[in-house]
Amino acid sequence: MIPFVDVQNLSKSFGEQWLFDDISFSIGQGQRIGLIAKNGTGKSTLLSILCGREAYDSGSIIYKRDLTVGYLEQSPSFKAGDTVLEACFNHEKNEEKILKAKQILTQLKISDMDKPMGELSGGQQKRVALANVLITSPDMLILDEPTNHLDLEMIEWLEKYLSRGNKTLLMVTHDRFFLDRVCNVILELDNKQIYQYRGNFEYYLEKRQARIDNARAEVARANNLYKRELEWMRRMPQARGHKAKYREKAFYELERIAKQRIEERQLRLKSSNVYIGNKIFECQYVSKVFDDNTVILKDFYYNFARYEKMGLVGNNGTGKSTFVKLLLGLLQPDSGKFDIGDTVKFGYFSQEGLSFNEQDKVIDVIKNIADYIDLGGGRHMSASQFLQYFLFTPEQQYNYVYKLSGGERRKLYLCTVLMKNPNFLVLDEPTNDLDIQTMQVLEEYLADFPGCVIIVSHDRYFMDKVVDHILVFKGQGNIKDFPGNYTQYREWTDDEEKQATETEEKKQEQRKEQESRVEKQKTKLSYKEKREFEQLEKDIEQLETEKKTIEDKLSSANISVDEITTLSKRLPIVSNELDEKTNRWLELSEYT
């Protein structure tokens, strides 16, 4: 395997905070590496350093000579006046590249190539940036959240694109299906160190847990020994001999191990203090059409069941978020209505998010909602405990909001929704920008949630873990109701497509057989032709006899001049007639 990049003893800090310290790893040709870490621990910074966009404190990065790298930033920026096509060509432009750019942009649902970049949404700009990287066909791709703002169809297209051939890539993504299907190596940045797992995401989960269990056991052993050595350190005088100094040095290493903070398993947060009545909501023949004739709902009926956990899936623009806003009364339907039960208390997590006071501390944002959550049965969870459950450390809880990363802000917003203790959660793209550990906590929370849930998400792994029913928005008011999770739906659609293909192939086969039968029927001799065929056989036999007789006589010595003249005139007539009848006989014989 040819090494493309070799990272040795790399360290990076911001002030007193170290993101990573003395880390080493390499990227080889054909490796498709997924980089995993908690939000705010330096994933994007590491990618930016590898691309030469950001400095580092110490260490070295050695690149293969003439290596070309394509880099997708998490939040790319463009000149507002550039057209989409111009934004794809800050490098040399040629017809082949233009054709490739148009093909990829079309796949990514960017159709107006002349539209100014300033008129595109942030999500559309991210897709143009992705196309910009892919069309250059670099030796190595470095991608920061490539699936953000892509719908399921585009994500699955990108999965196949990146999996083809011998591509080399390093990417940060929280899409676990994507990691599992694309990557063959996982790098985890944890506690300022790097860990490598040679396998896909499922393999990583298994081996990571084994690493944590081993580390926890090592810390437990170190703690037991540390107590004994601490007593020795306290008893021993300051002037120590050579052996004692060696033991003292070993003590400080032991202390370092004993004081490590190993990730603890989260206790499941099970609340029994959420009540919701039997009547949830009834969507009574609701219709909604926008001014551009985009049909969202058309006489749509659905009766939502108690404790149902439903997922809404479909391509962007098919109406998922609009459906949610209609349910919550943020938009009004053109006709029909939502009849909502009296006990329903919605908790809404929107794509737009919450606007925070930047000078507030994290803990105060939550305490402004409630000091604690009543879990029922005399159990309570304080605001601080709730934040810790969602992986805000005690130190982070007393950070100011302005210090939070984008992912940490989304997580805090999620906590503000859940802290209100609703009985019906409506979550629109809740996993965007959340790290994998937080998503796992949220999955457990929702699995144990004793109320109702509607989730809009492109995260297939997350949907599989949480929902038991999905509505598939196919566009123009076409909505498929499917009992099951996303993977079950895809298996069902794959089976349907397979059956449809097999049915179509069978139909084509039957059509060919029918055509063949019709052709055969057409080619059978009619009664008249049969009589003609029989007569031709007799005529040919007679003509062949006559021809032979003429030829024998002409070659005889005992023949008169008049007879020679008569026979010579007759011979070509017989020969021509014989040829015509023989050809006709051959023609009719094909159908006998």
Image (cartoon, rainbow, N blue to C red):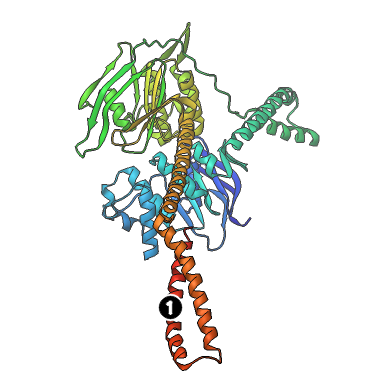
Looking at this view, is 303 or 126 the one in front?
303
Looking at this view, is 565 or 381 the one in front?
565
Can you give x and y, in whole percent of width and height, for residue 289 in the image? 22, 33
Can you give x and y, in whole percent of width and height, for residue 23 in the image? 59, 45
Query: Helix or strand or loop: what does disc 1 sit on?
Result: helix
Residue at the spot 47% in from the left edge and 50% down from the top edge: 161
Relative to 379, say whether 588 is above or below.
below
Can you give x and y, in whole percent of width and height, for residue 44 in the image? 47, 44
Looking at this view, is 81 or 425 the one in front?
425
Is 394 situated left or right of 322 in this image? right
| Residue 55 can be seen in this image | no
Is 301 situated left or right of 253 in this image? left
Is 223 situated left or right of 571 in this image? right
Relative to 271, say whether 325 is above or below.
below
Tell me how many marks there are.
Answer: 1
Residue sitting at the far top:
378
Is 221 situated left or right of 181 in this image? right
Quadrant of the snapshot with the N terminus: bottom right
Q: Which residue is mark 1?
A: 576
Can you give x and y, in whole percent of width and height, for residue 210 in the image? 65, 31
**Around disc 1, counting alpha carbons within 10 Å, would you say few (fewer than 14), some (14 to 19), or many (20 or more)?**
few
Relative to 80, say whether 544 is above or below.
below
| Residue 288 can be seen in this image | yes
Relative to 306, say whether 3 is above or below.
below
The kind of residue tagged 1 is Asn
